Amino acid sequence: MGVRKARAYSRKYARPSTRRSSRKNQNYIKTVPSQKITKFHMGDFNKYKDNKFRYVLTMESKEKIQIRDLALEACRQYVVKELETNLLGQFYFEVKVYPHHIQRNHKVLTGVGADRMAIGMAHSFGTSEGRAALVPADHPIFVVAIDSEKGLGIARAALHKIKAKLPCTTRILTTENRSVAVVQ
């Protein structure tokens, strides 16, 4: 059986479900799904840390939302591939959210004969199904730092294309660091 659709979780209120312990009997969550995001920082970190990039693009969420780690990883892979093929390491990319929240699914049988098999709400906690990042409104999701005007257009186009992969409305903010010399 596949993963439940993200719209079942995205806009609903979620009390953060992260309780896991090294002692098994104190765990609320028995099995924790693996982390799908492999890297959070890509590109030239030292140059970003020293504030030597001319342009910084930030993608922010306009609303309070849950974003699955699968969606974040798909966005990360697309943006990094576009930047690597066009800019060859002259960029910095960062995923600013971490999927701590563990999503649960209480599988319930429906259809003919389901009344004889279902246990109803007796054990309704559900099994862990995936991870999600709980993102508040106006919080950055991705940050891209670029040197050139050409790179700015490529990065903006890549961020614009991944809007369809995210379950929320977003905005892309551009800030310019004028203290950095212009690179052609």
Image (tube, rainbow, N blue to C red):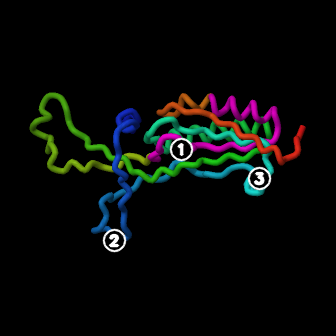
Q: Nearer the viewer, residue 102 or 151?
A: 151
| Residue ID for mark 2 | 23
Q: Residue at 51%, 48% (x, y): give it.
A: 36
Residue 177 relative to residue 156: left or right: right
Q: Spatial distance from mark 2 to mark 1, Cα to Cα?
A: 34 Å
Q: Secondary structure at mark 2?
A: loop
Q: Residues within 10 Å of mark 3 (few under 14, many from 20)?
A: some
Q: Spatial distance from mark 3 to mark 2, Cα to Cα?
A: 44 Å
Residue lying furthest bottom: 23
**Residue 3 lies in what quarter of the image?**
top left
**Residue 176 lies in what quarter of the image?**
top right
Q: Closer to the observer: label 3 or label 2?
A: 3
* Amino acid at the residue labelled 1: His
Q: Residue at 68%, 39% (x, y): give it.
A: 57
* Amino acid at the residue labelled 3: Asn
| Residue ID for mark 1 | 139
Q: How far from the left and from the top, in percent, is residue 61?
A: 52, 38
Q: Spatial distance from mark 3 to mark 1, Cα to Cα?
A: 21 Å
Residue 13 against residue 41 in the figure, above or below? above
| Residue ID for mark 3 | 51
Q: Quadrant of the C terminus?
A: top right
User: In the rendered structure, which disc, 3 or 1, sits on the residue that comes first in sequence?
Assistant: 3
User: In the rendered structure, which disc, 3 or 2, sits on the residue that comes first in sequence?
Assistant: 2
Q: Secondary structure at mark 3?
A: loop
Which range is magenta?
Answer: 133-160
